Amino acid sequence: MRKYIPIHEDDALRPHGLLTLGSRFRRLGERLQAETQVILDELAPGIPSSAHPLLAFLDGPEPRSISEIARALGTAQPGVTRMVTRLSARGFVSVGTSPEDARLRLVALTPDGRALLDQARATAWPRVLAAVTDLCAPFGPELLERLDMLETRLATKPLKDRA
């Protein structure tokens, strides 16, 4: 695992305040994912933490298209396609084509994928949730509310239109 240097006065981002907000969110997100990965690797080594929301989204009776998954996760389709390919190679998802449109790739959990998801929900996810809850105490709910607000406002009006 990559080591992170504690943030101190040599931090290149903090002095710039809101100007580097995106970079600070990215840095924080990468660190949270890396530390989450340590916990998840105990369950299924080699399955990235970023794959777990995708697996959870597939937990339903109907297969989902790559574009549906990308939209729901807020990520680009090529990244979803790479992750689906990786999960398929490990036997956690199956990929087929839509009977209505052969160009449309449909993704579904396999029995192994469902077992992994069930095990993650029972063991790893509660540990991650407890750790993040502790990290964010006592402002966790407020932080989530603010993040929701920022995402909504940015979707409504992009930065270039706010300058």
Image (tube, rainbow, N blue to C red):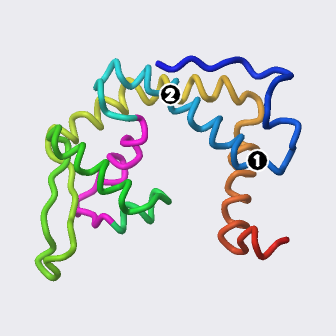
Amino acid under label 1? Leu
Residue at left offset 67%, top offset 18%: 5
| Position of residue 35 in the picture relative to residue 162 (left or right) | left
In whole angstroms, how far apart are the C-alphas of marks 2 and 1? 20 Å
Judge left or right: residue 1 versus residue 17.
left
Magenta-tinted stretch: 49-66
**Who's the residue at 70% across and 51% down the image?**
147
Please, is residue 62 above or below residue 121 in the view?
A: below
Q: Return the disc, 2 or 1, that comes first in the chain's sequence.
A: 1
Q: Quadrant of residue 157?
A: bottom right
* x then y, percent, for residue 122: 36, 28
Specify whether 156 is left or right of 129: right
Residue farthest bottom in this picture = 100
Residue 32, given in percent of the width and then of the height, sits at 57, 31
Q: Quadrant of residue 160?
A: bottom right
Residue 21 circle label: 1
SS for callout 1: helix
**Amino acid type for the residue under numbered disc 2:** Ala
Residue at left offset 79%, top offset 28%: 11
Q: Quadrant of residue 30?
A: top right
Q: Quadrant of the C terminus?
A: bottom right
The residue that mark 2 highlights is 34
Q: Give the crowd class for mark 1: few <14, some 14-19, many >=20 residues within 10 Å.
A: few
Asked whether residue 22 is drawn in magenta, I would say no
Counting the numbered discs, the total is: 2
